[in-house]
Image (cartoon, grey):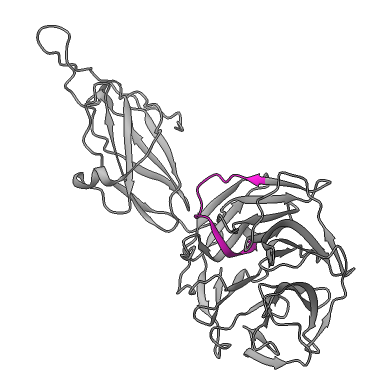
């Protein structure tokens, strides 16, 4: 419990009632707290204050303990036992002292009701206090608003993934039929469709990244229509609308699908992690990291030091430039679905993996989510994704991080209608305008989550 040091003094007489026959019995309950109030409110916490009663009415010594409760519904005597009970309210102070307690772990943008009662050392209890209420604030940086992109939309049910050109505010999609490409510009004409004569072999589970310095998109990996996993990579030139093999050198990653990727926008280098390969010998999962430098057209195996995260497919990942770390969260293998958080510290030689244990509970284990680095508010925003049971993870979650890599989960509550979520969806962030583009295969629509 946090004490402010503020004291309230008044003259009182202690009143103790003793029964007959010696020994004495305390039959006086602590006084009812009348001034419970909210001093401060944040996105996921409130600061509550009240004046400490005595163990005999408002006199005597300190009470033995407090029982602080909260609810999303108004608190009355009949619902007291169903309210959430706070643990470890701290040691009560002497009567007249101002008590102060910080209650954390609340949901954002939610109305809460609070009440308290106290007990003495023989378990006499006070009446329930006055009920105070407040609405928690939105997350730092906001929860955003879901907006549906302009019509006409691409074919419903298409498997589509792509990259975002932030400078031109365009999204490039590679989608079936594989000779057709889609370009979406939210600031001008909406969807455009164009064809190209040469295309890579059709595939799903691939990665597409926009390379700003080269003004090209790169396509890597995936699994083709006949079930073959590939590690080929292609450039797409949006000016000529033509594909070309990258001819990349270096340590090329083994064939895989379902890998995640994140880019260091300053250097133009992007990193990939994990994925899966299925062949005659069974399913193999990866926990390796490769980087691609488009300035040299070279792949590099990142020889990281242990401990390693478990191998997995369909993780979410992000690069945090201010800390020079590559972060992964979630994913699955054929046994488990993961909710753990790992960062690869690229400041050390060799780079080292560190598991991060967040300050509070987050979402259940998930896979297939997408990570957006909201640089302005030092947080990673997750959209999409499903849990182990196949249910949608939720509209959006955020991981707020500090310079010493402490992470706190916040469940966001965007306005508007959120997309239908499936494991085949696609999302990519536009950091310059603080928005996320989200293509839902479930309803065949493109959405924007605008902050």
Q: Residue at x 59, y 53 (%)?
A: 400
Report the span colored magenta: 355-374
Number of numbered labels in the structure image = 0
Locate residue 258: give its quadrant: bottom right
Locate residue 7: give its quadrant: top left
Position of 37 relative to 288 (above/below): above
Instruction: Please identify the residue farthest to the front as the structure is shown.
Output: 280
Position of 158 relative to 432 (above/below): below
Position of 443 relative to 20 (above/below): below
- Residue 154 visible? The answer is yes
Q: Residue at x 53, y 82 (%)?
A: 444
- Residue 378 visible? The answer is no
Give the position of the N terminus as an image quadrant.
Answer: top left
Q: Does the magenta stretch include residue 367?
A: yes
Task: List x then y, in percent, for residue 275.
Answer: 68, 63
Question: 286 or 23, which lies in front?
Answer: 286
Task: List x then y, in percent, for residue 424.
Answer: 57, 73
Give the position of the C terminus as an image quadrant.
Answer: bottom right
Q: Which residue is drawn at 41% across and 33% down?
A: 88
Tell whether 142 sits left or right of 187.
left
Tell whether 414 sits left or right of 296.
left
Task: List x then y, in percent, for residue 447.
Answer: 54, 77
Q: Does the magenta stretch include residue 84?
A: no
């Amino acid at each position: 419990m946090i004490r402010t040091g503020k004291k309230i003094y008044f003259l009182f007489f202690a009143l103790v009632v003793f029964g007959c026959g010696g020994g004495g019995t305390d039959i006086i309950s602590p006084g009812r707290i009348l001034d419970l109030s909210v001093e401060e409110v944040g996105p996921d916490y409130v600061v509550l204050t009240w004046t400490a009663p005595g163990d005999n009415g408002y006199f005597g010594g300190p009470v033995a303990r407090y029982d602080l409760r909260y609810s999303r519904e108004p608190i009355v005597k009949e619902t007291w036992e169903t309210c959430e009970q706070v643990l470890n309210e701290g040691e009560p102070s002497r009567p007249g002292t101002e008590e102060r307690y910080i209650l954390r772990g609340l949901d954002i943008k939610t109305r809460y009701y609070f009440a308290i009662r106290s007990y003495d050392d023989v378990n006499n209890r006070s009446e329930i206090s006055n009920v105070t209420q407040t609405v928690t604030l939105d997350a730092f940086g906001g929860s955003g608003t879901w907006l549906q992109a302009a019509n006409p939309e691409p074919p419903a049910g298409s498997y589509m993934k792509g990259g975002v050109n932030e400078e031109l505010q365009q999204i490039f999609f590679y989608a079936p039929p594989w000779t057709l490409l889609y370009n979406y510009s939210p600031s001008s004409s909406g969807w455009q469709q164009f064809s190209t004569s040469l295309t890579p072999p059709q595939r799903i589970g691939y990665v597409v990244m926009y390379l700003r310095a080269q003004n090209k998109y790169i396509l890597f990996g995936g699994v083709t229509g006949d079930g073959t996993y590939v590690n080929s990579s292609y450039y797409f030139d949006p000016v000529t609308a033509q594909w070309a093999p990258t001819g990349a050198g270096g340590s090329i990653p083994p064939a895989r699908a379902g890998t995640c990727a994140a880019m260091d926008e300053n250097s133009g280098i992007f990193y990939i992690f994990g994925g899966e390969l299925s062949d005659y010998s069974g399913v193999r999962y990866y926990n390796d990291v490769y980087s691609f430098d488009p300035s040299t057209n070279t792949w590099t195996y990142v020889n990281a030091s242990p401990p390693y995260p478990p191998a997995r497919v369909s993780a979410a990942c992000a690069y945090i430039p201010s800390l020079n770390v590559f972060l992964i969260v979630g994913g699955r293998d054929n046994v488990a679905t993961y909710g753990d958080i790992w960062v690869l510290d690229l400041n050390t030689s060799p780079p080292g993996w560190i598991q991060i244990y967040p300050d509070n509970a987050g979402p259940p284990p998930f896979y297939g989510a997408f990570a957006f680095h909201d640089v302005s508010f030092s947080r990673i925003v997750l959209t999409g994704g499903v849990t182990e049971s196949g249910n949608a993870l939720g509209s959006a979650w955020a991981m707020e991080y500090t310079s010493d890599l402490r992470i706190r989960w916040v469940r966001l509550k965007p306005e508007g209608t959120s997309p239908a979520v499936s494991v085949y969806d696609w999302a990519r962030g536009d950091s310059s305008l603080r928005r996320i583009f989200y293509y839902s295969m479930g309803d065949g629509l493109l959405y924007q989550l605008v902050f």
